[in-house]
Image: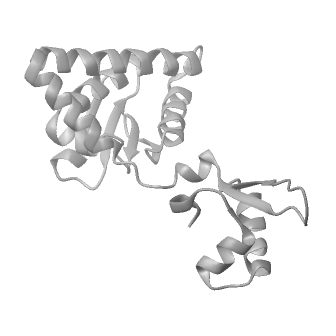
Amino acid sequence: MLRKRGELTASELAQCLGVTPVAVRHQMAHLQAAGLVEYYVQRRPIGRPPTVYALTKEADELFPKNYEDLATSLLKQIAELDGEVKIRQIFRTRAGHLEEAYREKMDGAGMEQKVATLASMLTEDGALAEWQTVDGGYELCVYNCLLSKVSSSFPQACSEELGLFNRILDTKVTRVEHMASGGRRCAYFIKKY
C-alpha cells in the first residue's frame, strides 16, 4: 500500500487493509526496526498530530527492478551502434575496475587468503561464493551468477571475469563448470603456486 500510495497514516493504512490502526502501528514498528519504514509526525493546527509512514530506500531495493533486461538491451544497442569490439571494451573496463578493488583488499596476502578474499567479496556482491582446498590448488564455486541474463547474450562477460580471476590471483584459473553453459554453478580450479 505504501508503495502504491506513498505516505499514509496508520488510520489510512488500516482502512485500506481492513485492520485496526493499532494493528498497523504494531506492524509499522517491526518494519521500522528492520529499516524498511520511516515516519514523521504531521503537525496540524488542531487535534492530535498523526504519524505518517513511508517506505525507506532500503525497502525500495526489495522491489523488482529488471536491471538485467535493461543492461542486456543497452548492450545490444551499443553492439548495433559500435560493434562487438566496444562490448569487449566495456567488459574489459568493468573487469579493470573490479581488479583495482580486489587487489586493494588482497594486497600482501598469500594465495589461500586471496582465494578466501575473492570468495568473500563475490558473496558481498550477491554471488553466493565459497571455496575449498583441493588437490593441487583450490576450488571456487559461485552459485548465483550476477550476470546470468547478460552473459547469455554476451559471453564476453564470463571470459573477462575468468581473465580477472587469473590476474588477481596471479595463477592459472580454469573454469570447470559454467552456469551459462547449463551448469548449476560456476566452478573454478585455481592452481596453487
Nearest the viewer among 55 and 85 is 55
Q: How many marks?
A: 0
Q: Residue at x 87, y 61 (%)?
A: 49
Colour pattern of the rendering? one colour
Can residue 30 be seen from the camera position used here? yes
Q: Nearer the viewer, residue 40 or 29?
A: 40
Q: Quadrant location of residue 167? A: top left
Is residue 173 positioned above or below 16 on the image?
A: above
Image quarter (top left, top right, bottom left or bottom right) of the C terminus: top left
Residue closer to the observer: 123 or 168: 123
Question: Which residue is rendered at x = 31% and y = 40% of the image?
Answer: 147
In the image, residue 16 sits, relative to residue 84, either above or below, namely below
Question: Residue 162: image x %, image y %?
Answer: 29, 28
Name the residue nearer the viewer: 116 or 24: 24
* Residue shown at the point (35%, 20%) measured from the top left: 95
Q: Quadrant of residue 26?
A: bottom right
Q: Does residue 124 lie above or below 159 as drawn?
A: below
Within the image, what quadrant is residue 52 found in?
Answer: bottom right
Residue 177 can be seen, yes or no: no
12 vs 78, left or right, is right
Residue that appears at 32% across and 15% down? 93
Give the image location of residue 181, x and y in percent: 16, 47
Is residue 4 rendered to the left or right of residue 46?
left
Query: Residue 84: where, in percent of width, then height?
Result: 11, 20
Quarter of the figure with the N terminus? bottom right
